[in-house]
Image (tube, rainbow, N blue to C red):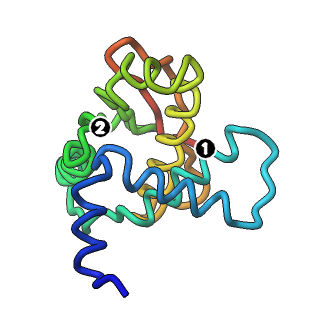
Amino acid sequence: MIPSKNVDYKLQRESSRQWRMVVTAMAQEFTSDTPYGSANDFGQRVGANYAVQAALPACSSLRDLETAISNRWQSMDWGWINLDDRGKNLLIVHHGAGNGQFAAGAFGADAQVWLATFLSGVYQQWLSSLGAGQDLRVKQISPIDEFGTLEFELSR
């Protein structure tokens, strides 16, 4: 029997911190019994699974939330975000998602599609768990650019 400390050490050292939790969330979805109507449904579910694993701390302000989310993404080299309360909606600008064109180079042109649906699922789960409710939905409102910047909004 290999001591768990050895396994934990190998997992931390020999798997990319950038993808470790994403792959874990994906593996959980692969083994679930959830039916999917589309690849977008799958991406959303993987994102939601990731968000549960990477739960955010309690936040008392929009700036606290922006900092908590940015810290989470920066800890795995997935960029940072800006939040903008626009009254009827919340704008989420994610910079450096999956390292922009590097994700497409590593995973093919479709990487930008699943990356956006994954992030949408993450933001939906995080914001719902912080009290956004089920009536508010996260939607992608801009395509991802070559630097990995894309925009989402939380609205009705």
Q: Split into 4 quadrants, where in the image is the N terminus?
A: bottom left
Alpha-carbon span between mark 1 and mark 2: 17 Å
In this orientation, which residue lies closer to the viewer: 110 or 116?
A: 110
Residue farthest toward the top in the current orientation of the protein: 146
Foreground residue among 103 and 118:
103
Q: Where does residue 137 sit, x and y in percent of width and height?
A: 57, 46
Residue 109, image x, y percentages: 56, 17
Task: Judge left or right: residue 30 versus residue 38.
Answer: left
Q: What amino acid is found at the position of numbered circle 1 in the picture?
A: Gly
Q: Name which quarter of the figure residue 80 lies in.
A: top left
Relative depth, front residue between 37 and 67: 37
Pointer 2 local density, CA inside 10 Å: few below 14, some 14–19, many at least 20: many
Q: Position of residue 62 (x, y in %)?
A: 24, 49
Q: Position of residue 48 (x, y in %)?
A: 53, 56
User: Which mark is on residue 43?
Assistant: 1
**Classed neighbour count for the residue bearing mark 1: other residues with Cα under 10 Å, few (<14), some (14–19), many (≥20):** many
Q: Say above or below: 60 vs 45.
A: below
**Left of 12 or right of it: where is 26?**
right
SS state under label 1:
helix
Q: Is residue 105 above or below residue 32?
A: above
Tell which of 38 and 151 is nearer to you: 38
Residue named by callout 2: 78
Residue pictured at 25% horizontal, 34% vertical: 79
